Amino acid sequence: MADSFDQQTRDDVFDYLLRLGDDRLILGHRLSEWCGHGPILEEDIAISNIALDCVGQAIGFLRLAGEVEGKGRDEDKLAYFREAIDFRNLLLLEQPNGDYAYTIMRQFLFDAFSYHQYEALQESRFEALAAIAAKSLKEVRYHLRHSSQWVLRMGDGTEESHRRIQEALDDMWMFVFEMFESDALEQRLVAQGIAVDASALQPKWEEMIANVLSESTLRRPMEPGYQSSGGRRGRHSEHLGYILSEMQILPRSYPGAEW
């Protein structure tokens, strides 16, 4: 189907795939920082596996993006040889891990979004994109179950765990609304049956979040006066630069190396 795209659609699909891929690549890198440092052995293994799932999903999206672009860039070149301004990930996903409550809350907020996004993308007219979404949805079901169960354990656990997970929710709430922004590029693809209208996912996300927060005895934050945004346009926090310097140093230091 990609061969039939006009140049505008090709450019739009490329950018849209970068958004999908960059979200999972940056989150996967963040989660990988817990490898060997998890609070318990089983959780160390679980969060490392989720990191690998995210990177695997990123590979699929970025590889497809390179094919759509048609300029000889594969998933490695798109991951390792772009600058921060060229990344399209959500600001939420580049935020530091903090303590484990912060990591879990960030994961839960995105898992709930990702679940509904993949569910809808299965119906994309772009069959290659729909196939990645269908495969990834199976993984995200597990991710969502894992993160929501930990939110419940912490929220309805001890006074200390409740305080930590509530603080994580309060601090990250300013980033969640960026997930549901829908710009002209996305709307052009929605009209062609290729992309999903992110704003249409918010009611389902809100319902899922509300149910888990209620069961976890957590308080939904008030709407923030300031809602952070800009990641889809390449406007990032300083945190992304540190992530990329660590992630990209080897291939940039030894371009073309194979191992």
Image: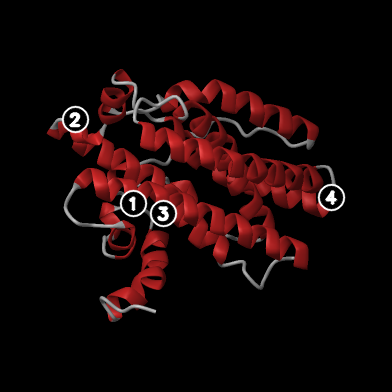
Mark 2 residue type: Ser
Q: Earlier in the sequence, mark 1 or mark 2?
A: 2
Residue 31 percent location from the top left of the image: 57, 60
- In front: mark 1 or mark 2? 2
Residue displayed at 75% across by 48% down: 150
Q: Tell me: 48 left or right of 18.
A: right
Which residue is denoted by mark 4 in the rendering? 159
Q: Tell me: 36 left or right of 51.
A: right
Secondary structure of residue under mark 3:
helix
- In front: mark 4 or mark 1? 1
Q: Earlier in the sequence, mark 3 or mark 4?
A: 3
Which residue is denoted by mark 2 in the rendering? 4
Q: Which of marks 4 and 1 is nearer the N terminus?
A: 1
User: Are dots 4 and 2 in contact, CB under 8 Å?
Assistant: no
User: Are dots 2 and 3 in contact, CB under 8 Å?
Assistant: no
Secondary structure of residue under mark 4:
helix
Residue 120 percent location from the top left of the image: 48, 26
User: Are dots 3 and 4 in contact, CB under 8 Å?
Assistant: no
Which residue is denoted by mark 1 in the rendering? 63
- In front: mark 4 or mark 2? 2
Residue 250 or residue 6, whichever sits in front: 6
Number of residues whose C-alpha sits closer than 10 Å to that of mark 3, classed few (under 14), some (14–19) or many (20 or more): many
CA–CA distance in space, label 3 to label 4: 40 Å
